């Protein structure tokens, strides 16, 4: 006589996977196209900004007066402002209520 494990009373059902609704997939594809289009427009406008503002200017930075392209000076100032805005909530003494 061979030893077989006892079989359970309930039949084992295969795992069911939930498939996304086709409409949701279509919406994701449209949102991805919109994101890529907006990103492309931002990059194109950035490139045009740099091209049209390529004149050399003198910038006064405390004790230093470098001559550089206007576009780089404005982009650098925008980047520093962005970083300051990101770091502002973590400064000591500032708490949100």
Image (cartoon, rainbow, N blue to C red):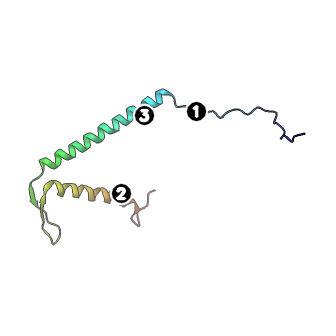
Q: Earlier in the sequence, mark 1 or mark 3?
A: 1
Q: Is residue 44 above or below residue 18?
A: below
Determine the CA span between mark 1 and mark 3: 17 Å
Which residue occupies 21% across, 43% down? 45
Q: Residues within 10 Å of mark 3 (few under 14, many from 20)?
A: few
Q: Quadrant of residue 35?
A: top left
Q: What secondary structure is marked by label 2?
A: helix
Residue 86 in the image: above or below residue 6: below
| Vertical relation: 10 (above or below) 66 | above
Please tell me which of labels 3 and 2 falls first in the chain. Answer: 3
Residue 86, numbered circle: 2
- Image point 38% across, 31% down: which residue? 30
**Percent x, y of residue 20:** 52, 31
Q: Provide the secondary structure element on which disc 1 rests.
A: loop
Quickly name the residue at label 3: 28
| Residue in the image at 12% along x and 67% along y | 65
Q: Secondary structure at mark 3?
A: helix
Question: Is mark 1 in CB contact (under 8 Å) with mark 3?
Answer: no
What residue would you read off at disc 1?
Answer: 18
């Amino acid at each position: 006589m061979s030893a077989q494990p006892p079989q359970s009373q309930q039949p084992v059902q295969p795992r069911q996977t939930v498939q996304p609704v086709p409409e949701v997939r279509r919406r994701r594809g449209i949102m991805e196209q919109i994101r890529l289009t907006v990103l492309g427009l931002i990059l194109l406008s950035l490139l045009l900004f740099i091209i049209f503002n390529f004149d050399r200017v003198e910038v006064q930075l405390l004790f230093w007066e470098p001559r550089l392209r206007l576009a780089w000076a404005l982009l650098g100032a925008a980047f520093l402002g962005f970083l300051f805005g990101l770091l502002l909530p973590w400064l000591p003494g500032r708490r949100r209520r």
